[in-house]
Image: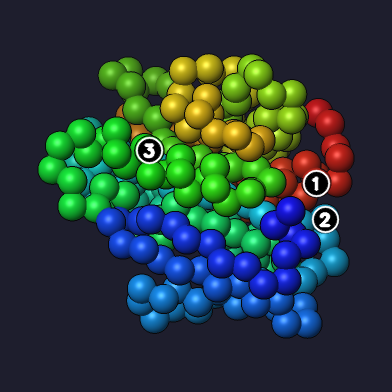
Amino acid sequence: MFKNIIRDVIKVHLQGKLRLFILLLLGITISILYISYPAVLTWTEGSSSLSGQIIAIDPGHGGFDGGAVSKDGSLHEKTVNLNISLYLRDYLQEAGAFVIMTREEDVDLTGNATKNKKRIDFNNRLKVINESDADLLLSIHLNSIPSSRWYGAQTFYHSKSEESERLAKLIQDEFKNNLNTTREALTEDVLIMLKNTNVTSALVEAGFLSNPGELELLKSKEYQLKVAESIYHALLRYFDGDEV
C-alpha cells in the first residue's frame, strides 16, 4: 500500500504535461517535488487521526469551464471552489494528512484538446483520483438554480458506499452546526465524480450562487474558510470513527 512505501514515484498527467511526484520519507516529513514547475509542498506528521491519511480534493471546474455564475456575473463557481479547496488543503496538511489536488490554480485538465473538452477534463480528474490510492475524495462545488429562494450547503454521496454515506452525513452535520443550513446529506448516483471513483467520496455543494444573501457570503474569505473548517472537522470525526 501507498502508506507503507518509503520511496515511490507517481506519474500523473495534468494539463497535457507529465508531472513527476517524488515522495521521500525522511523522518517525519515527505517532500513533494513538482518537476514540471518550481513548487514544494510538505507533509508533516501530526498526532490527530488525520495524520498519514491520503485525501484527494477535486475543486470543481476551472480553466475554460467556469461552472455556475452569479446572476450579476460577479462570481464564478470555479473561483470559490478553488479557494475553499486550498483552505481545506492547508488545514489537512497542518494536521498531518497527505493531500492530492486535481488542480491548484485556475486550469482545466484538457491539455491541448480542442474537442470533447468537458469529457476529457472529467476523465483526467478521475485518472488522478483513481490512481492516487487516496483514502477518500472530496469534490467541491457550488449550486445555482433559476429560483433565488433556495440556500444552504449540501453534501451528496453514492448509495453503493456505506462509508461514503457516513462521510457525507458527518460533513452535513458540521454544515448544520456551523453554517446557515438545515439540509440533509442525500444520495446522488448520477454524478460522475461519485459513480466513477473507486474511493470513499462525497461531493459538497457549498451554497447557492442564485441566492443573493448566500452569494455575498460565498464571496467572502471568512465564509470560505468557515466552509473549509467545517469539512475539516467532519474529516477528523470520520477518521475518529464517529457516526451521526
Tell me the quadrant of the picture where the C terminus can be found: top right
| Lateral position of residue 228 relative to residue 59, left or right | right
Instruction: Provide the residue designation for mark 1.
Output: 239
Left or right placement of residue 86 versus residue 112 in this view: right
* Residue at 22% over, 39% down: 117
Residue type (three-letter) at the residue carrying disc 1: Phe
Measuring from the top left, give residue 226's x and y in whole percent. Answer: 58, 51
Alpha carbon separation for disc pair 1 and 3: 28 Å
Q: Are marks 3 and 2 in contact (CB under 8 Å)?
A: no
Gap in angstroms between the C-alphas marked 3 and 2: 31 Å
Of the residues shown, which amino acid type is indicated by label 2? Ser
Label 2 or label 1, whichever comes before in sequence order: 2
| Residue name at image x 32 percent, y 18 percent | 147
Q: Which residue is mark 3?
A: 123
Q: CA distance from mark 2 to mark 1?
A: 6 Å
Q: Are marks 1 and 3 in contact (CB under 8 Å)?
A: no
Q: Which residue is mark 2?
A: 49
Does 199 appear above or below 55?
A: above
Q: Earlier in the sequence, mark 3 or mark 2?
A: 2
